[in-house]
Amino acid sequence: MNTLFRLGTIAALLTTLSACSSLPSFKTDTKEKLNAASQQISELQKQIARTQQAQAVTAAASSKSATTVKSAQCTARIEIPAKYKTEQVKIAIGGGVEKVEVIPAKFKHQNEKILIQDASEKIEIVSPPVYEDQVKKTLVRKGYQTWEKGRGPIEKTNPATGEIMRLINVPAQYRTIKTRVMVKPAVTRTIKIPAQYQEVHKHVIDQPARVVKTTTPIEYKTVPKRTLVSEAKIEQHPIFCETNQYSKSIALLQLNLKEKGYNPGSIDGYVGKQTLNAITKYQQDNELPAGYLTIDVMKRLGAL
């Protein structure tokens, strides 16, 4: 009540000042200040209306449940949703490809001597050999003795025929061979013949062909990654049940839900379908156990 009185007094004062701003004697800067004050009046009037509405609901509920007594808290098995965290991670979206490039060989021109005939030696005759003809007898048949018919110094009678046989000497037979014999060998000298070369123009490799491997840089992209922090589970939680739903607490809950952007329906101090839908949406948005009006939610929303 004191709060409403103070807010009303301030609003009345600001209204009076706003009315004075229309007078010609007011300066421009004063008028600007009063315009800002008018906006504050509007906000204060809204706050007064909300406070009066909550007090009216509380008073009505108090008259209906003046004899209501807080009973034992109810509990329920509530599924705690899995919790996730979102992190920005880098993922590769391209690059990292190995490229193979063949660098061709490089050539250059140069003169080069090539061997066309190996080195050798030649023997040259300084003076020819000297020969002479020689005659040489060669034995063809050796001399021997034989018996023939006739008379001689040594005789004998052939017992078979009775003829007188004489012993004769048959001389040896020779053959005369004329040969040419070297009496003085030839005089020679060795002449060395150098190798022979020819200069040619050649196209030779200056740098051999080679293979160059390069890897393109990896391209990254930052994307959100949702990681599981804790898995879903079932827990026993204290909840508001019918016997301990105080109208004042539910009215404050509805009022605070509405201020946070959730539509609880009529601010009547009762948990209807629309209020329960608003509570469930609030629980899901804040990753809280959903499906029941828990004591934790009541405290978070300032209803307890």
Image: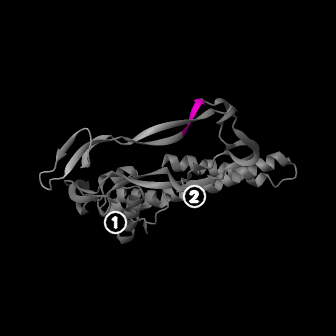
For the point 32% across and 40% down, the residue is: 143
- Image location of residue 157, percent across then percent down: 16, 48
Would residue 140 appear left or right of 123 to someone viewing this image?
A: left
Q: At 85% from the left edge and 48% from the top edge, which residue is drawn?
A: 28
Q: How many marks?
A: 2
Q: Residue 39, relative to residue 126: is it above or below?
A: below
Q: Amino acid at mark 2?
A: Lys
Q: Position of residue 229 (x, y in %)?
A: 35, 50
**Magenta: main secondary structure:** strand
Can residue 26 be seen from the camera position used here? no
> Residue 144 in the image: x percent, y percent?
29, 41
Q: Is residue 83 visible?
A: yes
- Nearest the eye: 165 or 61: 165
Q: Give the Cα distance between marks 1 and 2.
A: 25 Å
In this view, the residue farthest toward the left is 159
Comparing 18 with 163, the one in front is 163
Please name the amino acid that badge 1 sits on: Val
Label 1 element class: loop
- Answer with mark 1 or mark 2, whichever residue precedes in sequence: 2
Front position among marks 1 and 2 = 1
Instruction: Tell me if 178 is positioned left or right of 277 in this view.
Output: right
Q: Residue at x 15, y 56 (%)?
A: 161
Q: Which residue is mark 1?
A: 271
